[in-house]
């Protein structure tokens, strides 16, 4: 019997944050000027990450995604990919990156055994990119995408967080860009999690609005027929011209009751939900010498008691604003999305 929580959700997907550092300051994730970082001594080694991953896969995890912060800032990341790729229980080994330094690493990641790659691309306009991320390196992101294609990552996915008044007029442009390079675009509703300290409901562009906007250009979008992973966050649609895109409606239509994923921070704190207030330290028992069986028992007991439905619960908040003020994030950096792996 698969390991399941109180709602029958299996433990199938693990997001591994390898660093809390990032080289961008995107307004929807890291809008503040200063941050509190995890102590370097607390960061898991590659061997510790690989060992914990083996424990998770022994309990049913089959999908592993490397995240950050920006994961490619972790020195020699292809070496970790190679370690994880040796685990035969991992059916899907993926990575999400902002693409800034991807051009120099795409080939090594592919050679190391990475299966899939997702690149964040919120705008095609360098001026908007600079205003929103405080970086002038938009061209480096595009170069990273091209390097990923050249390395053989196919299909490549592009993630776009849609924010009203920022990039909601670029949906069709991004579809055209993705089609031109053979990548699938996934539009994501702006979420009120972690470091989104300037979030407001008025800035959220809903899935309905996104599809209506695309329909004006391409005709009505039809839900993609055929089998799909019911736990996957993206609903996929076929546009009138045949192009396929995805929409992740985490804010207006959460998928909590099918969610099979959890998150391990770079310092080994395990979170069962993106909105969870507290996590469980796996680093402490690991470094205290706990055998795999003890770690597995801790993970299994914690998952069996899982009741989290954070995004659904947020729907019931009447006066909904940012989840945390900046002061609360400084007291506990684990609340940040660049720590939890978003």
Image (tube, rainbow, N blue to C red):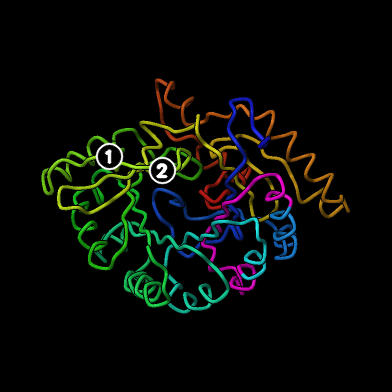
* Residue at image point 64% right, 33% down: 4
Marks 2 and 1 in Cβ contact (< 8 Å): no
Picture quarter containing residue 209?
top left
Is residue 81 at least partly visible in the picture?
yes
Left/right placement of residue 12 relative to residue 51 reads left
- Image coordinates of residue 117 in percent, x first then y, are 45, 63
- Image coordinates of residue 264 in percent, x first then y, are 64, 49
From the image, tell me which residue sits under label 2. 228
From the image, tell me which residue sits under label 1. 223
- Image coordinates of residue 147 in percent, x first then y, are 39, 76
- For mark 2, does the 10 Å Cα neighbourhood hold few (<14), some (14 to 19), or many (20 or more) residues? few
Which element is circle 1 on?
A: strand
Instruction: Between residue 58 and residue 47, name the one nearer to us.
Output: 58
* Residue at image point 42% right, 69% down: 153
- Image coordinates of residue 11 in percent, x first then y, are 62, 40
Q: Give the range drawn in magenta.
A: 55-81
Instruction: Between residue 336 and residue 17, name the one nearer to us.
Output: 17
* Residue at image point 61% right, 73% down: 75
Of pointers 2 and 1, the one earlier in the residue sequence: 1
Asked if residue 79 is among those painted magenta in the image, a careful observer would answer: yes
Which element is circle 2 on?
A: loop
Q: Alpha-carbon distance for marks 2 and 1?
A: 11 Å
Instruction: Between residue 229 and residue 47, name the one nearer to us.
Output: 229
């Amino acid at each position: 019997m698969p390991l399941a929580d109180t709602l029958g959700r299996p433990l199938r997907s693990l997001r591994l944050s390898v660093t809390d550092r990032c080289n961008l300051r995107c307004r929807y994730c890291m809008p503040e000027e200063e941050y509190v970082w995890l102590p370097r001594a607390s960061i898991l080694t590659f061997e510790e990450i690989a060992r914990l991953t083996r424990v998770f896969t022994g309990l049913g995890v089959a999908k592993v995604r490397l995240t950050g912060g920006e994961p490619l800032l972790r020195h020699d990341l292809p070496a970790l990919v190679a370690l994880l790729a040796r685990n035969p229980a991992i059916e899907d080994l993926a990575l999400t990156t902002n693409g800034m330094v991807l051009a120099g690493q795409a080939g090594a990641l592919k050679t190391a055994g990475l299966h899939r790659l997702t690149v964040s691309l919120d705008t095609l306009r360098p001026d908007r990119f600079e205003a929103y991320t405080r970086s002038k390196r938009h061209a480096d992101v595009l170069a990273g995408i091209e390097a990923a294609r050249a390395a053989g990552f196919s299909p490549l996915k592009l993630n776009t967080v849609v924010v009203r008044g920022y990039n909601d007029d670029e949906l069709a442009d991004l579809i055209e860009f993705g089609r031109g390079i053979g990548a699938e675009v996934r539009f994501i509703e702006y979420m009120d999690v972690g470091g989104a300290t300037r979030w407001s409901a008025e800035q959220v562009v809903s899935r309905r609005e996104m599809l209506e906007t695309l329909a004006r250009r391409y005709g009505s979008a039809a839900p993609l027929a055929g089998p799909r992973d019911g736990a996957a966050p993206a609903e996929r649609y076929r546009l009138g011209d045949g192009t396929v895109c995805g929409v992740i409606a985490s804010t207006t239509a959460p998928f909590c009751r099918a969610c099979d994923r959890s998150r391990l921070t770079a310092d080994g704190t395990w979170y069962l939900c993106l909105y969870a207030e507290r996590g469980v330290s796996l680093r402490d028992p690991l470094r205290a010498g706990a055998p795999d069986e003890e770690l597995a028992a801790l993970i299994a007991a914690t998952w069996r008691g899982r009741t989290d439905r954070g995004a659904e619960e947020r729907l019931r908040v009447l006066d909904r604003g940012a989840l945390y003020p900046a002061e609360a994030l400084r007291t506990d950096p684990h609340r940040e999305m660049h720590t939890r792996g978003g």
